[in-house]
């Protein structure tokens, strides 16, 4: 099988091209010698099965960040038939440097100048044949986002792949003594083949920046935008969730129950009350999750995240973090795992560890499901979105508190420079692809963790044989009893305790577990819980869910990224302690005040 | 005689050319890749509140840089 690697600077549109080439078939793959996961896809190129590997975006082949080391390691230890260099055509004057570095290694490559449409609008003209001649790499202008030039580029890639012979494995370090010469050549090539207007300005981006980065309006606008986004997710998502729950409830009552009525009661209770109810309750939140990720995709692709870094950097510095940490926290709202991996661009270990310590407090989409569920069950439709927003605020408060507490231990003064790309809007195709990726991600998790989780919960609540499900005599009752001295001061009852224990594996299991424990589903489940606990207990439970260890995947990621058992234990112990203190403090204070 | 200024001392709207980078080699690679090369023209667009970072424009690239890092870059007005 042939192997093609995608290389480019951040914001060059590498992922967009990868998605266009691979469709939605991308898989995360492990590489020998690398602790990180790379996106790969298999596709047929020029009649050969070819493996397309998406390498992390890097600025420089000899940089010192983890991402840059990953790329170097990959180039040194794998045979590569063709490199696709993706460069932003509007910034060709500096992005071409990466192509020159790769050429000095003797790697066979094709240069794809992406965002050709933007470059044209800015009045930048590129003489492709002249560039090809001087650079020695076949070059094509494309727009990965809209598809212009893609067909020609694809044919170019195929013909190059047919003619290329894999480069011998590289020893990179020796090949880099010739920087000054490379810089002169870069200037010469640009002079000969690129025509840039004297003054280019992206006037739309400038106008938006004048408002969004305004000295005093910038931060209030940022928080207003965030609030509106979360408000929209709840307002649009809650009815969708109810609709799916209602549909799945009908499937259960009209199809499954009659169909399985001939089975022994214990088995049908296991299949319906265990497996189906558990998974259906979790599945009803898929629309909320898709909605959430669509919003995230718009914000991420728009270029607003790096503006958030710009606005928040001064405040984050006082907590021992920086603007990049803030962006990773926002990414963590989707899922903590990629946010943790995103810290690879930080070179200072202290900063990186402190950021990894606070990311798990980011209210991820899995926890969002639990909160949408609890808020809908225990609060009025008017209060529920405010309850949700208060949890996002709490998420930030725990981040700030933790950072301030630990910043002395994880010291850093790392200089950094961050690009502020022009504002862009994702295409419908990109949003659709993103939504699809989230659904398939959910289905993978569902088949692994969630099914096993709800089955285990069913066993715990229904064994030993013959007990009243979830009663004090069941195994779950025993565990709840055992944990009661610890969790009852926080107002968390034995049923919720079981859900929390399984939530350690993945937060999606929490509501699935509740469905199994209460033997109810959909709106019945919400009513059942509302009858048993009051809002103070529910809020305490939500606080605990927000703060304690997010999930096994997060812990595993922290372990492989930090490579430190000591640090991993800290990220386990500290959130648990804090969760208990905050929940208990809240519960006792609320009760003391007479709620 | 030419007088060099610290980049951090520039006001919004001012234009200057990069002259000296007083940074470690790791950060120098990054700055190079972002377009901070000797002789290159840059413009200060704005600075963030609370003594926050600067927004700089080099060619068609906008970059944010903290005040203390901008202090380590000398420019010619």
Image (cartoon, helix red, strand yellow):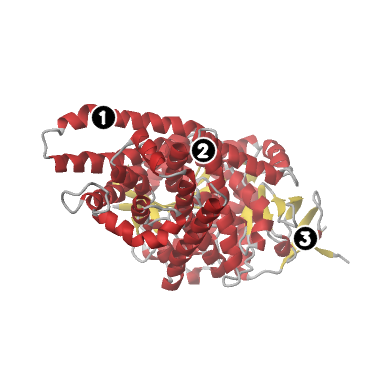
Q: Quadrant of residue A369?
A: top left
> Residue at (36%, 48%) from the top-left corner?
A510
Q: CA distance from mark 2 to mark 1?
A: 28 Å
Q: What chain is tagged by disc 2?
A: A
Reply above or below: B11 against A576.
above
Residue lying furthest right: B1
Mark 2 vs mark 1: which is more N-terminal? 1
Q: Is residue A498 left or right of residue A172?
A: left
Taking depth in this image into account, of A362 and A500 the one nearest to the observer is: A500
> Residue at (39%, 62%) from the top-left corner?
A485
- The mark tally for this picture is 3
Identify the mark at residue A384; answer none if there is no mark: 2
Give the mark toward the camera: 1 or 3: 1
In the rendered image, which residue does mark 1 sit on?
A251
Q: CA distance from mark 3 to mark 2?
A: 46 Å
Residue A56 can be seen in this image: yes
Q: Judge if badges 1 and 3 mark residues of a common chain.
A: no
Q: Quadrant of residue A168?
A: bottom left
Q: What chain is tagged by disc 3?
A: B
In x, y percent, where is residue A138?
48, 47
Q: Are the residues tagged 2 and 1 within 8 Å (C-beta)?
A: no
Q: Judge if badges 2 and 1 mark residues of a common chain.
A: yes
| Dot 1: element | helix
In the rendered image, which residue does mark 3 sit on?
B8
């Amino acid at each position: 099988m042939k192997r093609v690697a995608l290389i480019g600077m951040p914001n060059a549109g590498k992922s967009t091209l990868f998605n266009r080439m691979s469709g939605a078939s991308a898989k995360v793959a492990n590489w020998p010698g690398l602790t990180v996961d790379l996106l790969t896809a298999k596709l047929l190129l020029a009649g050969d099965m070819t493996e397309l590997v998406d390498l992390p975006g890097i600025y420089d082949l000899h940089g010192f960040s983890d991402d840059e080391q990953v790329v170097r390691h990959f180039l040194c230890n794998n045979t590569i038939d063709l490199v696709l260099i993706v460069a932003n055509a509007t910034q060709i004057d500096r992005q071409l440097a990466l192509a020159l570095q790769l050429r000095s290694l003797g790697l066979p490559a094709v240069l794809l100048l992406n965002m050709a449409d933007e470059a044209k609008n800015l009045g930048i003209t590129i003489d492709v044949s002249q560039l090809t001649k001087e650079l020695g790499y076949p070059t094509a202008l494309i727009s990965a986002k809209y598809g212009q030039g893609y067909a020609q580029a694809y044919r170019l890639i195929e013909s190059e792949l047919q003619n290329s012979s894999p480069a011998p494995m590289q020893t990179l370090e020796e090949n880099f003594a010739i920087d000054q010469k490379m810089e002169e050549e870069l200037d010469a090539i640009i002079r000969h083949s690129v025509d840039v207007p004297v003054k280019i300005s992206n006037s739309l981006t400038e106008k938006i920046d004048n408002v969004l980065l305004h000295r005093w309006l910038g931060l209030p606008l940022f928080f207003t935008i965030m609030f509106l986004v979360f408000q929209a997710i709840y307002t649009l998502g809650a009815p969708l969730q109810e609709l799916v729950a209602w549909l799945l409830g009908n499937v259960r009552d009209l199809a499954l129950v009659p169909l399985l009525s001939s089975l022994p009661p214990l088995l049908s209770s296991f299949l319906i009350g265990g497996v189906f109810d558990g998974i259906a309750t979790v599945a009803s939140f898929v629309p909320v999750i898709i909605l959430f990720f669509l919003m995230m995709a718009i914000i991420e692709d728009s270029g607003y995240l790096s503006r958030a870094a710009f606005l928040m950097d001064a405040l984050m510095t006082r907590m021992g973090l920086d603007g990049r940490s803030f962006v990773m926290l926002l990414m963590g709202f989707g899922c903590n795992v990629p946010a943790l991996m995103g810290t690879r661009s930080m070179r200072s270990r202290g900063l990186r560890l402190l950021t990894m310590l606070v990311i798990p407090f980011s209210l991820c989409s899995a926890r969002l499901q639990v909160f949408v569920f609890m808020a809908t069950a225990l609060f009025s439709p008017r209060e529920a979105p405010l309850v949700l927003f208060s949890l996002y605020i709490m998420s930030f408060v725990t981040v700030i508190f933790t950072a301030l507490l630990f910043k002395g231990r994880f010291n850093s003064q790392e200089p950094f420079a961050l690009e502020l790309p022009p504002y862009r809007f994702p295409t419908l195709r990109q949003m659709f692809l993103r939504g699809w990726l989230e659904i398939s991600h959910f289905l993978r998790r569902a088949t692994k963790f969630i099914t096993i989780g709800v089955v285990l919960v069913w066993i715990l609540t229904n064994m030993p044989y013959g007990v009243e499900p979830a009663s004090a005599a069941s195994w779950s009752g025993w565990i709840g009893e055992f944990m009661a001295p610890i969790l009852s001061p926080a107002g968390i009852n034995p049923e919720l305790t079981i859900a929390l224990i399984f939530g350690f594996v993945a937060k999606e299991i929490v509501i699935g577990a509740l469905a199994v424990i209460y033997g109810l589903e959909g709106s019945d489940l919400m009513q059942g819980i509302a009858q048993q606990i009051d809002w103070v207990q529910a809020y305490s439970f939500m606080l605990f869910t927000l703060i304690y260890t997010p999930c096994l995947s997060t812990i595993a990621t922290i372990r492989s990224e930090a490579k430190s058992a000591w640090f991993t234990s800290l990220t386990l112990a500290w959130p648990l302690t804090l969760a208990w203190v905050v929940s208990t403090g809240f519960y006792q204070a609320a009760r003391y005040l007479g709620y | 005689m030419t007088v060099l200024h610290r980049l951090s001392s520039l006001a919004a709207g001012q234009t200057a050319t990069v002259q000296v980078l007083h940074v470690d080699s790791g950060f120098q690679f990054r700055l190079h890749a972002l377009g901070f090369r000797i002789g290159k023209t840059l413009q200060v667009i704005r600075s963030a509140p609370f003594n926050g970072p600067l927004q700089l424009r080099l060619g068609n690239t906008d970059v944010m840089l903290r005040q203390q890092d901008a202090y380590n870059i000398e420019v010619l007005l």
